[in-house]
């Protein structure tokens, strides 16, 4: 196997005020806006094309966000999945996949090609245990548990054709891939693509590019790993942040990578907790939107709309 290419990108910061736990960057290709969260602040943040920053305080810890077909944002809070209207400030409850009986909170999540909000949880036990899970939430509030025995669900992303779903566990340090039906959200066979060492970077948030490569934030190693569909690390981007948490593609041509990070006192790097950006020789994919059956990331002709049908596994529907 060829050794990975080492790249030190020309990085710039896009915010001045560091975040405590920055996560879940999402580029809105319709407005040229970057959204992201500060989990424990807790806050939802919007960076407009003009550089204006709007901060929306949340009532509970926020793990992830997704775009909707209207101006609202789907958010994963400690209290469940809600729709948030940044104009009125109103919240609409959708679902609480975790409930209060399990010592977990919602963590990494994304809207998938099927228009559902896919959201995983993270164990908050000390030490962490495999009590977390991965859920699929519909716009009608229907919720299905699709994976269990996780510790820190993370790394959700889809292949360009929407027929493969990636998922990682940041504590168990593995990356897996599932066959995926982009019309219905049905999961097929899953397989483990690779495991990671601490030096390679525990797999945190992720995204995919138009060529089918998977970009994983190595939160323990200060780097971003570009991984082939076969599971090989082909490029390593050395970053000025000690703990990158999640990348997303953005910019006019979807050739800019935005990366969130968490604050840490392990190094003197001033960028810790910043959202950084750099240009790459790869093109990302437009985001999916909650409730849309053939979202902007795929051609409707290639993936005709379905009815969001039920999954064919033995998951729990609520």
Image (cartoon, grey):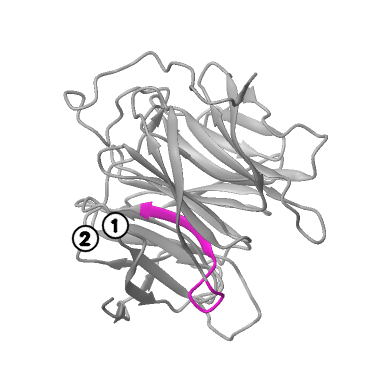
Q: Is residue 16 left or right of residue 305?
A: right
Alpha-carbon neighbours of circle 1 within 10 Å: few (<14), some, or many (≥20)? many
The reply to whether residue 275 is visible in this rendering is no
Tell me the element at label 1: loop
Residue denoted by label 2: 282
The reply to whether residue 55 is visible in this rendering is yes
Residue at 54 percent across and 51 percent down: it is 154
Residue 116 within the segment the image draws in magenta: no
Residue at 51 percent across and 22 percent down: it is 138
Residue denoted by label 1: 213
Residue 100 placed where, x, y %?
81, 34
Residue 245 placed where, x, y %?
52, 62
Q: Given the current orientation, which residue lies at the most extreme top position?
A: 307
Residue 290 placed where, x, y %?
43, 28
The stretch of residues the image draws in magenta is 197-207
Q: Is residue 120 left or right of residue 29?
A: right
Alpha-carbon neighbours of circle 2 within 10 Å: few (<14), some, or many (≥20)? some
């Amino acid at each position: 196997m060829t050794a990975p290419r080492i790249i030190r990108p020309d990085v710039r910061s896009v915010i001045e005020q560091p975040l405590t736990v920055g996560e879940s960057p999402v580029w809105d290709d319709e407005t040229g806006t970057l959204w992201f969260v500060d989990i424990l602040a807790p806050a939802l943040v919007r960076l407009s094309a003009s550089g204006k920053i709007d901060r929306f305080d949340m009532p509970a810890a926020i793990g992830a966000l997704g775009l909707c077909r209207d101006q609202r944002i789907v958010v994963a809070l400690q209290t469940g999945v809600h729709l948030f209207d940044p104009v009125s400030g109103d919240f609409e409850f959708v679902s609480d996949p975790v409930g209060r009986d399990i010592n977990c909170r919602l963590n990494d999540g994304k809207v998938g090609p099927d228009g559902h909000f896919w959201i995983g949880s993270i164990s908050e036990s000390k030490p962490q245990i495999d009590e977390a899970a991965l859920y699929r939430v519909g716009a009608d509030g229907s919720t299905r548990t699709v994976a269990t025995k996780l510790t820190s669900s993370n790394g959700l992303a889809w292949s360009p054709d929407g027929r493969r779903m990636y998922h990682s566990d940041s504590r168990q340090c593995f990356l897996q891939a599932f066959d995926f039906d982009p019309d219905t959200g049905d999961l097929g066979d899953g397989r483990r693509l690779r495991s990671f060492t601490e030096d390679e970077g525990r797999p945190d948030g992720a995204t995919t590019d138009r060529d089918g490569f998977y970009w994983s934030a190595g939160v323990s190693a200060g780097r971003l790993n570009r991984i082939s569909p076969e599971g090989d690390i082909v490029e390593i981007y050395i970053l000025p942040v000690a703990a990158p948490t999640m990348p997303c593609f953005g910019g006019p041509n979807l050739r800019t990578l935005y990366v969130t990070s968490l604050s840490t006192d392990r190094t003197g790097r001033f960028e810790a907790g910043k959202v950084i950006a750099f240009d790459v020789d790869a093109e990302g994919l437009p985001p999916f939107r909650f409730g849309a059956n053939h979202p902007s990331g795929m051609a409707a002709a290639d993936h005709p709309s379905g009815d969001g049908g039920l999954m064919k596994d033995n998951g729990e529907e609520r």
